[in-house]
Structures are given as structure tokens and as C-alpha cells.
Amino acid sequence: MFNYQGKAPTSLLSVKNLTRLYAPNTGAQDVSFELYPGEVLAIVGESGSGKSTLLQSLCGSVPPDAGQVIYQDTAGQSQSLYELSEARRRLLMRTDLGLVHQNPRDGLRLRVSAGGNISERLMAVGARHYGQLRATSTEWMRQVELDTQRIDDMPTQFSGGMQQRLQIARTLATAPRLVFMDEPTGGLDVSVQARILDLLRSLVREYQLSVVLVTHDLAVARLLSDRMIVMKDSRVIETGLTDQVLDDPQHAYTQLLVNSVLSF
Ligand SMILES: Nc1ncnc2c1ncn2[C@@H]1O[C@H](COP(=O)(O)OP(=O)(O)OP(=O)(O)O)[C@@H](O)[C@H]1O
């Protein structure tokens, strides 16, 4: 996982005083943080605290009312997400960023085969050779432990857990530099959740993924993240290394959250 030793690297994502409010204290306000390459940052908090609003603003889908989202592109240039033209922002989102939705159906094309779902993303970044697309899609199905014999099956023929694996494969196949995950195990049975979490943990390690992960589940944050942000009523109330925050929470609300979970 992320190594904090030595010289501080340049941040991949820099969020400055981001605000998106739907009503007073409803949404996300005055959020600032840095995300470094290879780091997994969890955003936690109870339902309605503003986690998804923040994530949507970070990944380019909901413009903030104020503040900046600055992304370091492959060429090392700082790109202020909402100061780019719509076309440039879309291109950046397609080539550099990936999003795993809570509901796999939101991140899959249901009328396209499993292999087609993965190939489509590869084609969006320029891949064209049919044999190569097929081979890469097969390899990604293997990576997420899906039966490669089912490459021509439709996602609707898959179980919820299998659909989530396919969505993860589709998202990671283009090697995004930054992956956003919104409750990636949220809608699944507990046993399926555990297996998807195992998979995500090994993929994060193997590919040194940089991830912003939204979860209300502290156990998920513990398992996957290096650092965490705790939100309440639209604001960040605590931030720090995951183990530190969970083992020694400073804010009364974080203490309550941690104490409400028996063991994790
Ligand atoms: N499009 C919208 N229009 C109006 N209010 C909204 C909109 N989206 C979110 N909100 C409100 O903003 C607040 C934060 O919602 P948000 O979905 O960001 O919270 P959350 O922490 O992700 O919650 P959950 O864990 O339940 O998904 C809530 O009070 C919600 O009702």
C-alpha cells in the first residue's frame, strides 16, 4: 500500500475548498484534501452526510458551487477539472478516471455482452484490433475471477456479485490513473461482499491503484484505505491515517461511529 516514508510525492488530486450545497448544511462544503499516487482515501460518514455529493463533484459529474478540483495529468500538468472545456473534461474522464458505481447496472451496458462491455471502454481510448480486444477482455475477466467461457453472455445473465466483478473489470481495463468507487460492495449479500472486497484489495495492491472510496462501512474503509475523511452534515470533521482515526478517533462523532461498530 501507500508508502509515506521519504520525500512527499506530488499529489494526483488536489481538492481546494470544494462546496456543493443543495440547502444549508446539505451537500458538501469547504472540503479540502490531497490524494497521492497509489493511495486509497476513504470518505466515510452516515447517510446524508454528503459523501456521494462530494464524489460526484470530484469525478466531474456535478459542478461545485465553489472551490477547485485539480488533477495532475499523465504529462504532469495540473488540470482544473471544471475550468476545462466540456470536451476536454469528458476526454480526461474517459482516459484517466474510472468510476465504480454501487449498482453495477449503472456502470454497465446491459444490452452488450460481458466481453463487449470491457472492449467498449478499450475502444473509447483508441483500441481497434478485434483479436487484441478479445484477448484483453478475456484477461480482465480472468483477473476479476469471472468464467471466461461466459465472455459472450449478457450482464443480465450474471448474478449481482458477477455484475460487480464485470463493472470492476470494465473500469480497470483502461488503466485509469484515478478510480472513484461509490459503495462498491453496498448492494451485495455479506458473503458476496467479502469476496468482492478481497478482489478489490488484491487489485489495489497489484496495480497500485489511486482510489477515492465512498463507504458508510468502517470495516470496508479499514480493509481498503490508507487514509480517511469523516463527514458529518456536509463538512469534514476528521481526517487522518485510517488506522489512527479508527483506533484513536478524536472527534466525538467519530468516536460514536467507531463505538457503534462492535468489531472490525
Ligand atoms: N440532487 C439533489 N437535490 C437535492 N438534494 C440533494 C441532491 N443530492 C443530494 N442531496 C441531499 O444532500 C445531502 C447529502 O446527500 P449525499 O447523497 O451526498 O449523502 P451520502 O452521505 O452520500 O448519503 P448516503 O450514504 O445515504 O448515500 C442529503 O441531505 C441529500 O438529500
Image (cartoon, grey):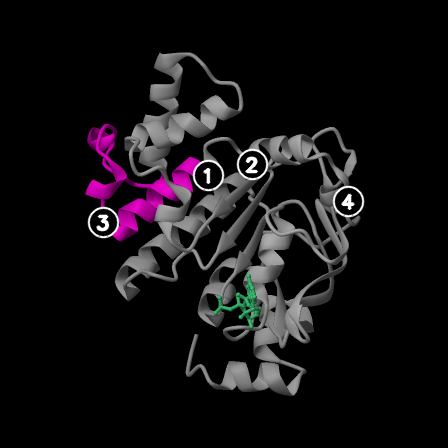
Mark pair 3, 1: CA separation: 18 Å
Report whether residue 40 is seen.
Answer: no
Q: Is residue 144 left or right of residue 42?
A: left
Res. 103 mark: none
Tell me where residue 188 appears, x and y as whole percent: 31, 60
3 or 4: tag closer to the N-terminus: 4
Of the numbered discs 1 and 2, the one sitting upstream in the chain is 1
Residue 151 figure quarter: top left
Residues marked 1 and 2 touching at CB (< 8 Å): yes
Q: Amino acid at mark 3?
A: Ser
Tag 2 secondary structure: loop
Q: Which mark is residue 176?
A: 2
Using residue 210 as the reference point, say whether residue 188 is left or right of it: left
Comparing labels 4 and 2, the label whose residue is closer to the camera: 2
Q: Which residues are magenta?
A: 144-171
| Separation (CA) of disc 2 from disc 3 | 26 Å
- Residue placed at 53% from the left, 33% from the top? 175
Mark 1 sits on what residue?
Answer: 171
Q: Which residue is mark 4?
A: 10
Residue 184: quadrant of the picture: bottom left
User: What is the three-letter code of the residue carrying label 4?
Assistant: Thr
